[in-house]
Image (cartoon, rainbow, N blue to C red):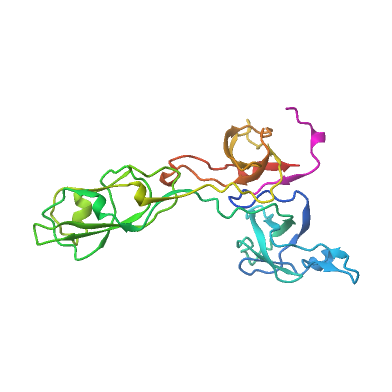
Amino acid sequence: MMITASDFTAGLKIIPSDTINIPGPRSKYDGVSTAVTVNKLTDTSIGLQGGFLQTVDVNGKTINQGVQVGDVVYNTSATRASIAYVTAVDSAFSLTLSANIFPVTVARDGYRIYKGHGVNLTTAWGYQLIVADVTNQTISSFASGTDSGGAQAIVPTGGGTYLGDATFTMTVAGGAGVATVQQVTVATTGTLSEVDLIGKTVIFSAADINGINPGTGTGTGTCTFTITSANQTYTPENYDVGNAIPFQLYCGGTTAAPAAACDIYVTTIDGDFVFFEDVQPGQILPVAVCRVNVGAAAGGGNGNTNTLTTATGRYVALN
């Protein structure tokens, strides 16, 4: 598909967000914050632009469109560029925001307000453990330990295949020299993982178990918990992208010679998540985009899959 300059009439510099769709592209208000309150935008000079409140005349005709809940606010500072959406219109001079994006009291930051195109508050998806006693699913060859004196926090280091961040407790009970593992419990669920957990193993080494007894255990052997379908829940992906509109995304260049490429994690207008690697400066992505996501670097919670958007100040949404 050939794209020419005449195909576009507006552009907006992108600030990535995992929840807020690309707004605008034309701004409704712009100015400089005049005071600092947590999760607020205050501008006592905004009266010159009609104020944030919508106003109508005696005939019901709108004189000033004002700001609506769901509109998007940019902090346009070069060092604190950030994004939030409006959760309440407090007055003609003050807005409540979804995030504290104007935190500095000395230097007042510039802002722009755009019409919002939807917010997705349930982007997190994946598998996580259920808080429960899993004793009946553990295989323990541990014996001759020391009584732990009840349930104790324990970190598995036995080389299991579960790489998440759930936490566990264990009870070792019995007489001195004959104590064994009596109970294993998932204490906290851990963060959502994009990797199915069924069949993954959590292995507590002898050192792990001896360390809770209380630090003086001399038992031998290990304890293994194998995750089954009864031990995990699944939160599906949310493909509802609100009242999104499509944009083409342009990647700008850098002062480096040659200019550096970048990675971009986007949500398409159809709700698909796509990760573009090594996007070259000057390139326009070949899909219609409604959101540029922050993404995340590869880690245990996401299957060591990289989705991190880099060089975030170089993208422009074209419409």
Is 3 one of the magenta-colored residues? yes
Left or right, 115 with reference to 49: left
Q: Which residue sits at x=83%, y=68%? A: 55
Q: Which quadrant holds the C terminus?
A: top right
Give coordinates of residue 224: x percent, y percent. 24, 47
Image coordinates of residue 230 in percent, x first then y, are: 35, 50
Left or right, 269 with respect to 151, comes to right
Nearest the eye: 36 or 152: 152
- Residue farthest to the front? 230
- Residues drawn in magenta: 1-15
Compared across the picture, whether 277 is left or right of 191 comes to: right
The answer to which quarter of the image holds residue 148 is: bottom left
Task: State which quadrant residue 287 falls in.
Answer: top right
Question: The N terminus appears in which quarter of the rendering?
Answer: top right
Question: In the image, what residue occupies the spot 58% across and 55% down?
Answer: 121
Against 198, residue 168 (above or below) is below
* Residue 141 visible somewhere in the drawing: yes
The location of residue 130, given as percent across then percent down, is 37, 55
